[in-house]
Amino acid sequence: MREDNVLIADYIKGSLEHYISAAMMENELSKEEALKTIVAPAIATLLKEHGAQVLTERDLDIIIETVETLKVDKTVKQIMKDFTKQIRNIMKGET
């Protein structure tokens, strides 16, 4: 990574840390809650506006809700739920 890219990444990291802290304090949330309900959805929306392909916890919840409405065998539904669960784990860095 070029030196100016490192500086930009450091700036973004610092801004993100500040955003997380502000979200926690303003809403009296834990770091995990602030990330899940405020920070990650806001950043995902911004990235999507720029054409990035990003999934949020809410997106995965919608997928699970949709799977429940499908008229398919229970085994197929379970496979789809397990697959979505694995995607969620990957998103959290739990591979």
Image (tube, grey):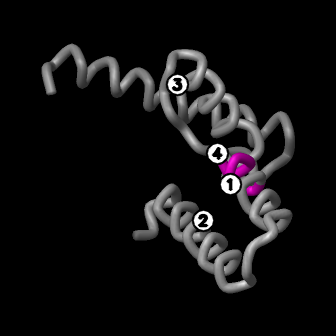
Mark closer to the observer (4, 3):
4
Mark 4 or 3, nearer chain start: 3
| Residue type at tag 3 | Ser
Q: Position of residue 58 (x, y in %)?
A: 74, 48
Compute the Cα span from label 1 to label 4.
6 Å
Q: Which numbered tag is attached to residue 56?
A: 4
Q: Position of residue 15 (x, y in %)?
A: 52, 25
Mark 1 or 2, nearer chain start: 1
Mark 1 near mark 4, Cβ–Cβ under 8 Å?
yes
Could you tell whether 92 is left or right of 7 in the image? right
| Residue type at tag 1 | Leu
Compute the Cα span from label 1 to label 2.
7 Å
Outermost residue, bottom direction?
75
Compute the Cα span from label 1 to label 3.
27 Å
Q: Quadrant of residue 8?
A: top left
Which quadrant: the N terminus? top left
Which residue is labeled 2 in the image? Answer: 84
* 63 relative to 16, above or below: below
Which residue is labeled 3 in the image? Answer: 15
What segment carries the magenta color? 56-61
* 8 relative to 66, above or below: above
| Residue type at tag 4 | Thr
Looking at the rendered structure, the secondary structure element under dot 4 is loop
**Residue at (21, 14) in percent of width and height:** 4
Estimate how packed mark 2 is, as few (under 14), some (14 to 19) or many (20 or more) residues with alpha carbons within 10 Å: some
